[in-house]
Image: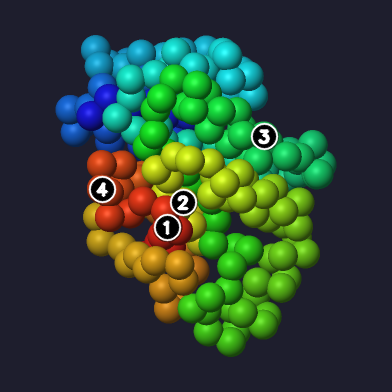
Amino acid sequence: MKLTVFGASGGTGYQVVSQALDGGHEVTAVVRDPARLAISHRSLIVVTADVLQPADIADAVAGRDAVISALGQSRRPQDRKAAANSTLCADSARSITEAMRQVGSRRLVIVSSSGPYTDGDGPVLRYVVKPILGRVFKDEYTDLVAMEQVVRASALDWTVLRPPRLTDKPLTGRYRTRRDANPARSMRVSRADLAHLALATADDPDTYHCAIFIAD
């Protein structure tokens, strides 16, 4: 496949790019700072662009078999104040979907979070853990919900991926998924396994227009 990856220098995006290249795909990685993407490969094109400007990213999404967005707000303590009230995820989704509309690209896989959603959760997660997380990450969750609304309102062939807490454990390929509801005891999953799912769904029409939850 010919893929475009947004958020390629982040933890999940890096895994998407690396696994895609290992799988023989051609990858265009759109980044703000190319120095942060420590990958070199003959099948990799690195594009420096402002993701919030559709005109700047139109060429990067044109003619792609799929576009994968792993953009997200940083949760590092030093970045939390700057992230407050941020609409980065919703704004970038709006820009990406508009750029894809302009050039006729249709397939979008976008990473969200299971945090704002409780369908399928047990009572502890539903009534104890997630209400606490909802207060701690209120701004981030509001942004992600708005992002999903933007994607759902588009005319694209989209899939939303909703992981729980992400870890840096290695790829296993053994993870649980469920459509439109959390798997039981959904607490964590590795970025590598999330990237594996993103690539697996990229060319799967059966995953169009649904949210897929994932957990280890």
Q: 205 and 192: which one is in front?
A: 205
Q: Tell me the SS state at disc 2.
A: strand
Dot 4 or dot 1: first in sequence order is 4
Q: CA distance from mark 3 to mark 4?
A: 26 Å
Q: Which residue corresponds to the image point at 17% horizontal and 28% vertical from the top-left?
A: 24
Q: Which residue is mark 3?
A: 91
Q: Which residue is mark 1?
A: 210
Q: 91 and 44: which one is in front?
A: 91
Residue 10 pos. (x, y %) = 51, 34
Q: Amino acid at mark 4?
A: Asp
Q: Amino acid at mark 2?
A: Val
Dot 3 or dot 4: first in sequence order is 3
Q: Amino acid at mark 1?
A: Cys
Dot 2 or dot 4: first in sequence order is 2
- Compared to 203, does 160 lie above or below? below
User: In the rendered image, which quarter contains the C terminus?
Assistant: bottom left
Crowd band around label 4 with a 10 angstrom C-alpha radius: few (<14), some (14–19), many (20+): few
Circles 2, 1 touching at the beta carbon (< 8 Å) = yes
Q: Indicate which label's residue lies in the foreground, 3 or 1.
A: 1
Circles 2, 4 touching at the beta carbon (< 8 Å) = no
User: In the rendered image, which quarter contains the N terminus?
Assistant: top left
The image's mark for residue 160 is 2
The image's mark for residue 204 is 4
